Structures are given as structure tokens and as C-alpha cells.
Image (tube, helix red, strand yellow):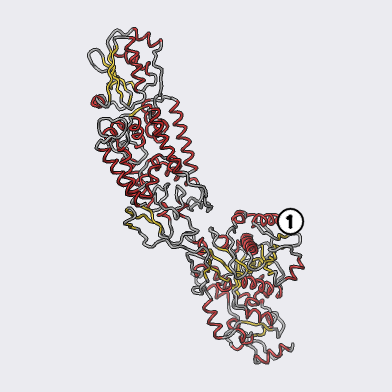
Amino acid sequence: MKVSSIVAFILAFVLLISGIYGLNIGPVSLEGRQYEQAKQIGSYICLSCIGLTGSTVSHTLTEDTLNRLKKIDYPVKIWIFTSNDCPTCPDAKAIILNFTLENSNITYEEIRLETQGQFFDAYAVSELPTLIFFNKDGIVLRKDNFIHKVVGIDNLQKKVIEAIEMVS
Amino acid sequence: MGKIKRIRTISQSLSLIIINLGFLGIFFKHLTGPVFNCYACPWASISCPIGLLQNFVMNGQVPTYVLGTMGAVFVFIGSAFCGWVCPFGFLQDAITFVKSLFKKNSKKIKRKPQIKNKSKDLSLITRLIVLLAILVLAIRYVDTIFCKLCPIGTIEATFPYQVANGFSYNIWLGARIAILILLIIMFFIVSRFWCRYLCPIGALAGPSNKISILKLFHSGKNCEGCSICKDVCPLDIEVVEDPNSTRCTRCGDCVDKCPKGNLAFGLDLFGLVTISPFKKKKEKVSEKKLVTPSSEGIPGSNEKQTDSNIIPPEERDILDEFKYREKGTLVERPAYMGFKRGERVYLPYEEVKKIGIRPPKTSLPVLLKQYSEGRLAEDYNAPEAFVEEKLEEKLSETPKSIPKEEVDKKHFEKFRVANRTELHIDHLKYLKELDIPIEIKAIANNNKEVPAVLLAIIDASNQINFEYLNARDQKAEWYYKDSLPSIYFNGKYYSGLLSEDELIYKIKLERYILDNVSLVIDYTRCIGCNNQSCKKVCPIFKNIPILNEGYGIYPLAKIGCSLCGKCLIECDRGGISFIFGEKLVIDSNFSIDMIKKNKELISTIYPETVMLFLEKNKKHSNRALNFTIALSYLSHGKLSYQIIDIVKNQEAVLKKKIGAIPCFWISEKVQISGMVSESSILAFIRKISKWKG
């Protein structure tokens, strides 16, 4: 028991220091120290992870969405906030991509937590995935004086098309 | 609530606030710790180690930071965070507290069965399986699968988001709410169910108890038979055997509740430096050790020895009493009291003085000679100047501070004098020689109902403690009052004839019981007894030393016990029993719980006398004796018993046609012989209730 306690003691501190000083061990080496990564992971809430939004969703647009989308004749820019470890962000991205393919007025930009963290703070985004919308002048869409955010992937198509219509 | 528990509750409450300081805008989410607190909670200020672990693994990293942080805590204090900080543990403690509110007798510690669980402790294995499954699922599906089902996430994150952002439903939500409900139900059934079987942090925290610097120490003193630590432990750990169990959450409830202070926290640095509150090493304790009762502190034992030194028992004679006027004398009954002239009675001298009867002029040897020849001297004069005391006046003078009972007693003492009668000289002799205290109680409507012969018996011996109870008195509630006057000998109702011979025979029977039955205390069961009900119900126990181990045998005659059986019923630990004979015969399976439960049925039976045919120093005989004592007490003394030793009274055995020993005999039709068990006794009780009723 003496030896095992000494070994455990040393191991614990080796792991702790290596985690703090960014000595990443493992098949994938990411930039940044692990405690900074921990802050990122902890700070932004993956909504699907707490059971608030479905894990899978159909990417193909419905007829109703397509019809409404055809009527959009003004430019709309969508920012989609994602992160590496967000499981539903790829789904949200795929749906928005379909929107842009159907109507060239609509463009999107992906804001990644790992590289563009400052935008998360600027627009007070703490849930993933989150979508915000800009008009042609680059003014963000607001609703009741708050930035209108579409959060999660539940009924995403419906929420996005409504927001796009509101941009007008 | 003990001191440690109170501090712990404060610690848990404060921790809950500190790790959820997000409502003040304070976040330190780069920090993590071995606590189960969802970081998706809008207020969570630190990160969840399990969530981080999954994310790092998903990204293909070795989670050195998380493991290092938790490990650094574990090597110092083991799993203390689980008991003192973790909010999910706090929730489980709160549920246990709520559960205790609903239960009756929540003040009493619930006794858990003493049966040792021979199956291996699988709790650590299940926790490890959960941890491994979490990691494997995270790697395989590149998703935080555990977080989707996590119960603390449901409480801390899902519900607040649902409230804030409107209700939405999906299959994961349904699943996680179902899991939470299931777990809460389990928390009501099994305390700390999550920590015990499922907690993935506990999978790492548990083993760390064995190597951490903070350790729980046991003093090494004998704790056999106590197991209060196990009873109060929310995780049912055998604390004495394994103080640093992998299940332990370091809550300290055992330290709090240990009545002997045999448990305490200390420090152990790699086994090299140990700061233990107890310095001695654990001693081996022999299992069965007979403790010979010391006469110290036992009432009467010292006096008896000194008496026997002065006057050897062979030389004592009833006639010796008459040499001392202080002790008593034979007096003639006053003729005006309604007795024949010349009728004599033995009276203590105090009484003689009180009632003012003149002692006979004839010298004692002459008087006795005349008595043995069958003729009495006729030269007694009428009592001189008998001044009747004005009792009523005296009673009215009694100061108010004297309790009513005492006034009643005095009143009784004064008025009973008129009903004296004379006893046979052999009986007088027997009563004078009586060296065992016997308790006699008479319950009557008034003092005149108390039989004169009984009073004469009482006066003839110093050893008889007599008490008169008025039937309407509150004190007399316990006693059987259907046919007054009721006479109780040592707590047993006497249903026979009120004749001199019968009463003396009854005293002889009682004496035989007290001479041959011994009280046995199993000291191992006394360890950790907080109630001390024995001391509350009987003053005798105040003089008996309570030891830490072994058995104490105390002959009833030596300790002045009247074998009422109250202690047997009141001791909730089964530490008190009685044996017939001198040898210690241990009966480990003896229990009177069923009899205790049916006390209402037992209290309804009609007065009955049982003949107990027993053999000395036999386990089953002792068991039958204990059952009978319990029944006798629970029936309010209505079931009186007499013991018959089958070795000495073979004639009686043949006459009553006893087949097997022990035998519980009322009549040829109503008896139990052979194995006397609790159920057979109860069946028997039902039978006599029907039979009579």
C-alpha cells in the first residue's frame, strides 16, 4: 500500500501539471492547454447534450420552406456558431447550406469557438448551435431589442425561414 | 443530528452555492473537481469532470488535466468531496432525511440485520463499468452520450432551460426524465444509491480511500455486537472491519454516532508517518469469555458475608429472635379486638410498642415449653392502659408536603393491625430463615380486604417487601383486578386459596425459582447501547458493572432480583436472559421479538398457573424459561409459573405424563412439550384464550 500510494501521489501531480502546461498526450494534439480547453467546453452549452434538442434531423428542405424561400429577394447573411465538440452543429450547418443552395441571396459564415471566441462574447452566445441573421447593411436582426437567436436544431427550418422573412 | 452531520450539511449547502456562483456572473470554468455538478446549468461556475472527460476523449486526447485535478484531490482526502461537497450527494442525503421524517420513531436508530453478507461487494465494479461505458460510448459515437442521460443535468440544466426557453420534447428528454424519476425512487429505497452503484466519479474516488492521506481509524477496542456505525452508515459499510472502504464517502456519520468514540479521522502519509487519534494496535479478542460476577457493588452481597461471619447459619434459630426485645416477641391478642382470650401472635417489637400490648410475663423458655406441650399459659393479664391513638387527628396533622401514597401507607399501617392472625410455628421458623427478598403486592378496594394471614406472613419475615395498592389507584392499573383482592408474588398473580399453607407454599416456590435461576448479561450486546433501558426499568442494574466483553452470570438471590421479567422485555438488544442452573449455556438464536409483538393478545389471557418442567443447564430449557418469564410479564402477571426440576422431581414427571423436556404444562390437554418455540408458545396462548374465552 505504501508503494501504491506514493505512485498515485506522483501520478496525480504529473497528470495535473501536464494538463495545465499543455503536454497533450494522445492521438490528436490540439492547440492550447487543457485547462483552457476545459474553460471552452464548460462555458458553451451543447443543447443536445442536455436533452433539449434532437440529435438527428432531416437535412432536406420541406416544400413549404422551399416555396417561402423562393420569395426572398433581399440579401441575408447567417452566422452559425459552432465548436469542435458540438454534436449537432454539423446538422445545423448542413441545413443552412441547403438554404444557400436554393437561394443565392442567402449566405452563411461559420464562427468557430476554438478560433473566433471573441464573437461568442460579443453576441453573448452560450448555447451551441446558435444562428444569428444580418441584413444587407450588416445590421443584426433584433427582436424586442434583443439579438434574435435561433438555438438548437429542433424545427430549425421553420425557425430559420421565419427569421429570414423578418429580416426584410 | 450530530455535530459532524450538522457541519457537513452546512458544508454541502455552502458548496452548492459556491459551485453555482454563475448567478453573480462569477465563472471559473477552467476549474473542475470531483463533484457531480452539471456545467450546462446556467449558474454553474465550475466544469463537470465527467463532461470534460468525455469531450477530451472525443477529441482524441488523454484527459490528463481532469484526471490530474481529481487525482490531486483524491490523494489527499480520498472521497471526502462525495460526502461534503457533491450536490448530487446532498440531494440524496436530503431524500434520506425526508424519508426519516415519514418514518415512525425516527429518533431511534434503525437496526439493520446482523447477518453478514457473504457475497462480494460489487459496488466498485458497477461504478467502474459505468465509467468505462461512458468513455467507450464517447469514443465510439463521438458524442457525450452520458450527458444526454445524466440525472444531475436534468435537474440543473434541462429543467431551467425548459422553463426559460419553452418546453420542447424529444426522445432523449423523455429518457432522461424517466431515469431521474427512477433514480429518485431508488434513493427512497436505498440511501445514496447513485454513490453506491453508479457514480463514475466514485469509481475513481472509492479506491483512493485506501491510499489517501486522510484515513478513518478504529481504536482496536472490542466493538463486537454493537454495529451502530453500520446502522448509521448511509452506504451500509462494515466500518469496523473496513474503515477505509471503497464505498465510503467520508461523511463521518459513524464517527458522530459511535457511542464509545472508537472511530476517528487521522492522517496516514504513505504508511510512513501515521497521525492516529488512537495509538494502540487492534487486539485480538476471544469470542466467548465468562466474566465471573464480582460481588462489588451488588446490593446485599457484602452484608450477607459479614452476617454469616458473625453467626454461622447452623446456629441460628428462630428462638434466638426472642432474646432480643428489639426484634419482636410473642404477644397475646387483646380480647376486646374480637379474638379469643389467650390467642397469641408474633409481633415485631416496634408494633408491640405502637399498639401498647404488654408482652407476656412468663419467660420465654417456659412459654415455648408450654407451647410444645400443646397447652398455653393462662396467666396473661388483660392489656394495661391501652391508649388508642387518635389516628384521624394524626392524619389530619400530616403536613401537605407528604405525598398521598405515603399517607395512604401510614393509614394502612394503622388500620390493618386489627386483622392479625397466628401462624404455625414451622411456618414462622421458615419465614424467619428466609434469606431472599420476596416482593408481595396486594391490590384491594380497602385495607380490610387484605387477608389477615398474609399480613401475618409479611410481619414474620424481614425479607418480604409488602406493598398495598388501592384498586382505584393509578399505580394498580397494571395489575389484574377482576377478583379482588389480588395478590402478587414477585410480579406473578396468585390465584390459589388464601390459606396459610398455600401462601407459604407459594413463597417456597418463589424461593426455589430465585435460588436456581440466574441472570445472564451478554455484554457484547451492551456495547453501544444508548437507551440503557435496563437501568431505567430496574434499579438492580445500576449496581451491576457493565463490561465490554464476555458474559456475566448473576444468581438472582445474590443481586436481590425478584424476577419480574421487565428487563427481559425492555432490553431491545436481547442482551438479558435468564438461565436455569449455574452453567453458562449460550443460546445465540434466542429472541422474543414475536412474543413482544403479540403483547396485546397475551395481556388478554385469564389467570393461569403453568408448571415448567425443565432440566438444568440445557439450552431449550433456558429458552422455555425465558419465554415463560416474558409471557408472565406481558400478561400482567396473570400467567404465573412454577419451575420443576425433572431430575429431582421424577415423580411429578411420571404423574403428569411428561413426554419431552422442556414442557410447558397447564393440564393434560393444554401443554407444549419438547421444542418450545416462540410460535408454539403463541399458538398455545391463542389456544388458552379460546379455551377460556
| Label 1 packing within 10 angstroms: few (<14), some (14-19), many (20+) | few
Residue found 43% across the figure and 57% down from its top: B258
Residue found 40% across the figure and 29% down from its top: B140
Q: Nearer the viewer, residue B177 or B582?
A: B582
Residue under label 1? B691
Q: How many labels does the image show?
A: 1
* Image location of residue B92, percent across then percent down: 43, 42
Indicate the amino acid at tag 1. Answer: Trp
Q: Which of B193 and B3 is in front in this view?
A: B193
Secondary structure of residue under mark 1: helix
Q: Is residue B57 above or below residue B478?
A: above
* Image location of residue B363, percent across then percent down: 65, 92
* Image location of residue B50, percent across then percent down: 36, 36
* Image location of residue B240, percent across then percent down: 44, 55
Q: In this view, does B201 lie above or below B492?
A: above
In screen coordinates, is B114 left or right of A129? right
In screen coordinates, is B363 left or right of B310? right
Q: Is residue B131 above or below residue A130?
A: below
Quarter placement of the C terminus of chain B: bottom right
Q: Nearer the viewer, residue B640 or B207?
A: B207
Determine the chain carrying the residue at label 1: B
Residue B187 visible: yes
Residue B569, by quadrant, is bottom right
Residue B158 visible: no
